[in-house]
Image (cartoon, rainbow, N blue to C red):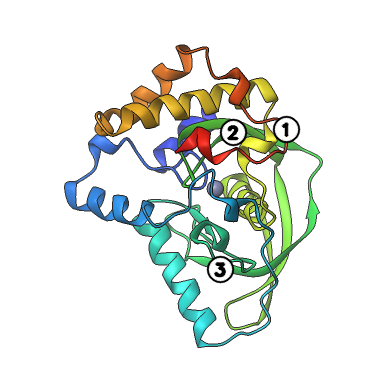
Amino acid sequence: MAETDELVEEGEGEEEDAPPVAELDPEVRARRDAALSRVRKLGDPVLRARALPVDRFDEALWSEVQRMGELMEDALGIGLAATQIGVLHRVLVYRADPEDPLTALVNPVLEWSSEETETASEGCLSIPFVHVDVERPAEVRVRALDAQGKEMEVQASGLTARVIQHEMDHLDGVLMIDRIPREERKEAMRAMREAQRAGSEIDSASDRVAQDAGDAASDADKTAPAAGEAVPDASLA
Ligand code: ZN
């Protein structure tokens, strides 16, 4: 769909995904790989945990937010939640539009979301090789604190609204694959496993592999997760 193409051009299938790896400058790619290796992946129980509200707005929080911002940018992502680096704080960062400054939301609370929804392709730094179409409210209003504890309110639409919702989900242990129909989830998981198997050999062709793998394979139905259920580690090693 048109919006998907736009997202991809911005370097992102939603939050987090990067442009085709083969096109990256080697230095950028090395930095991205290093950053990605520090992001917790599907199967890590921390991704299913509910993060706790932050109550200390100190130096440590400030540097945590800085680190998250750097990691997100190095990974060529457009959003990152603290849970994705194993920190159970209700903290997220995002920059959906390269023109925008990096924004950090601490203890974000959804105040309002539109009845109108949009469906667009999302990727996730924690779920490599997978893109899924996710339907979400088109517009949201979120109340939060900044990294210094100052109250803020964000009203967002389009990609920014999508990123914020995706990241807020992470803070509750919810992943994008929980928001798609069961059949599509099975397919996505199958594609990911295939891509991971092939990935070490054909890393640079990972996007193509992920796609191809989606059309092949038929043995994984039993291991696909049920709705809302954590994916067993064993299937994702
Ligand atoms: Zn994610």
**CA separation in Å, label 1 and label 3:** 30 Å
Question: Eyeballing the image, is 226 above or below 237?
Answer: above
Question: Eyeballing the image, is 23 above or below 222?
Answer: below
Residue 27: percent from the left, percent from the top?
Answer: 19, 53
For marks 2 and 1, give the one nearer the viewer.
Answer: 1
Lower sequence index among marks 2 and 1: 2
Discs 3, 2 touching: Cβ within 8 Å: no
Q: Give the residue displayed 44% in from the left and 73% down from the top.
A: 66
Question: Eyeballing the image, is 217 above or below 203?
Answer: above
Decide if residue 27 is on the left or right side of residue 219. left
Q: Secondary structure at mark 3?
A: strand
**CA separation in Å, label 3 and label 2:** 23 Å
Residue 3: percent from the left, percent from the top?
Answer: 54, 32
Lower sequence index among marks 1 and 3: 3
Question: Which kind of residue does numbered mark 1 sit on?
Answer: Ala
Residue 13: percent from the left, percent from the top?
Answer: 48, 38
Question: Which kind of residue does numbered mark 3 sit on?
Answer: Ala
Count of numbered badges drawn on the protein: 3
> Foreground residue, 110 or 96?
110
Q: Secondary structure at mark 2?
A: strand
**Can the viewer see residue 1 in this picture?**
no
Which residue is farthest bottom? 58
> Foreground residue, 102 or 21?
21
Residue named by callout 3: 104
Query: Where on the picture, by quarter, is residue 184?
Result: top right
> Foreground residue, 199 or 3?
199
Residue named by callout 1: 227
Mark 2 is surrounded, within 10 Å at the Cα level, by few (under 14), some (14 to 19) or many (20 or more) other residues, namely many
Lower sequence index among marks 3 and 2: 3
Question: Which kind of residue does numbered mark 2 sit on?
Answer: Ala
Q: Residue 120, labelled with which disc?
A: 2
